[in-house]
């Protein structure tokens, strides 16, 4: 029974203070709102004859995602995607109740973002407001396959850059995730619109009224993300560092014997100060039910 309560995570729902549940929920809401507002705005063309370029759309979605993840990752983990949240739930990196609440606010944020874009865009020029659609030469199953592998790549990258036991990962984790999203758009925007994010497509569908093949954009990224998460966690994750024997431990001034007086301790610290390794680039960790820069 205690295991069930722990997996459900009811204690997180009733937590107060800086661990109050409304903080990460607000972060996920804002992140998805900006993703749909600014990302889909790159698709809108404010003239009757022009069209937006794939390069512009791909870079916009990638950079917007990297930006919002960098901003909210210390609060919510920076999921900004139901496919990410579900993959984290399957691998026990987030509790069930919190995961469900994340998905709800992600979808609401996307709807609000698309609604704001609708309000700021002339009705006769807005088009479908960046709604993702399967290319007319593809059948829905082919679209599902493409979204499956896009979701697989995104979660593969996320789990790799967030691996807590990898010290070889350098640079910005949010930027790496954003570049993965941009790469997916570069390759697949002509196939399915490269959603990779069920909430992003849901928000556009609610405002535009286009619901064709909605299942493709939910099942594809979610199942692909789950597959990538399980493969990385059980097959490719870096091994945890093994503890060294006491005789092999490095010298540290904090290990002086208690019988030494304060002066001796002070001199030991001056001669050979303890070096605390801070892995700044590894701001993305899978622990304590979050993905990025978690408490």
Image (cartoon, grey):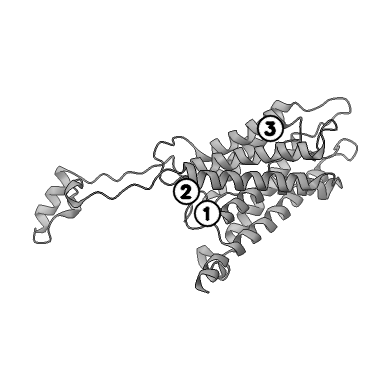
What percent of the width, then of the height, locates residue 293?
A: 48, 49
Residue at x-position 14% and y-position 43%: 271
Compared with residue 287, is residue 7 higher up or lower down, i.e. above or below? below
Describe the element under mark 3 as helix, strand or loop. Answer: helix
In the rendered image, which quarter is residue 38 located in?
top right
Q: Which residue is mark 1?
A: 290
Residue at x-position 61% and y-position 54%: 27
Distance between the Cα atoms at labels 3 and 1? Answer: 26 Å
Contact, mark 1 vs mark 2 (Cβ under 8 Å): yes
Describe the element under mark 2 as helix, strand or loop. Answer: loop
Residue at x-position 80% and y-position 37%: 134
Contact, mark 3 vs mark 2 (Cβ under 8 Å): no
Q: Which residue is mark 3?
A: 185
Residue at x-position 74% and y-position 34%: 42
What percent of the width, then of the height, locates residue 261?
A: 9, 59
Crowd around label 2: few <14 · some 14–19 · many ≥20 (10 Å):
many
Describe the element under mark 1 as helix, strand or loop. Answer: loop
Crowd around label 1: few <14 · some 14–19 · many ≥20 (10 Å):
many
| Residue 242 in the figure: left or right of residue 75 | left
Report the front residue among 290 and 273. Answer: 290
| Residue 129 in the figure: left or right of residue 19 | right
Query: Would residue 41 be seen by someone viewing this image from the given angle?
Result: yes
Q: Residue furthest bottom?
A: 1
Report the front residue among 121 and 170. Answer: 170
Q: Which residue is mark 2?
A: 285
Query: Would residue 81 be seen by someone viewing this image from the given angle?
Result: no
Compared with residue 136, is residue 91 higher up or lower down, i.e. above or below? below
Distance between the Cα atoms at labels 3 and 2? Answer: 26 Å
């Amino acid at each position: 029974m205690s295991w069930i309560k722990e997996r459900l995570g009811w204690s997180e729902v009733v937590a107060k203070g800086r661990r109050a549940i409304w903080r990460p929920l607000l972060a996920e809401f804002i992140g998805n709102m900006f993703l749909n507002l600014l990302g889909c705005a790159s698709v809108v063309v404010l003239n009757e004859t022009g069209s937006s370029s794939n390069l512009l759309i791909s870079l916009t979605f990638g950079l917007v995602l990297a930006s919002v993840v960098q901003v909210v990752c210390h609060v919510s983990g920076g999921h900004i995607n139901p496919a990410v949240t579900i993959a984290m739930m399957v691998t026990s990196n987030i509790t069930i109740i919190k995961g469900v609440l994340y998905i709800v606010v992600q979808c609401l944020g996307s709807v609000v973002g698309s609604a704001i874009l609708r309000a700021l865009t002339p009705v006769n020029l807005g088009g479908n407001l960046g709604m993702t659609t399967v290319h007319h030469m593809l059948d829905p199953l082919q679209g599902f396959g493409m979204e499956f592998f896009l979701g697989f790549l995104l979660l593969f990258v996320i789990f790799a850059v967030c691996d807590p036991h990898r010290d070889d990962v350098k640079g910005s984790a949010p930027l790496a995730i954003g570049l993965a999203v941009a790469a997916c758009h570069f390759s697949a925007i002509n196939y399915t619109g490269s959603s990779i994010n069920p909430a992003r497509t849901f928000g556009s569908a609610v405002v535009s009224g286009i619901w064709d093949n909605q299942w493709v954009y939910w099942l594809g990224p979610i199942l692909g993300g789950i597959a990538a998460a399980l493969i990385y966690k059980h097959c490719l994750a870096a091994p945890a560092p093994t503890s060294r024997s006491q005789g092999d431990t490095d010298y540290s001034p904090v290990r002086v014997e208690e019988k030494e007086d304060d002066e001796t301790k002070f001199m030991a610290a001056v001669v050979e100060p303890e070096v605390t390794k801070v892995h700044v680039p590894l701001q993305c960790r899978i622990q304590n039910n979050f993905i990025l820069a978690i408490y």
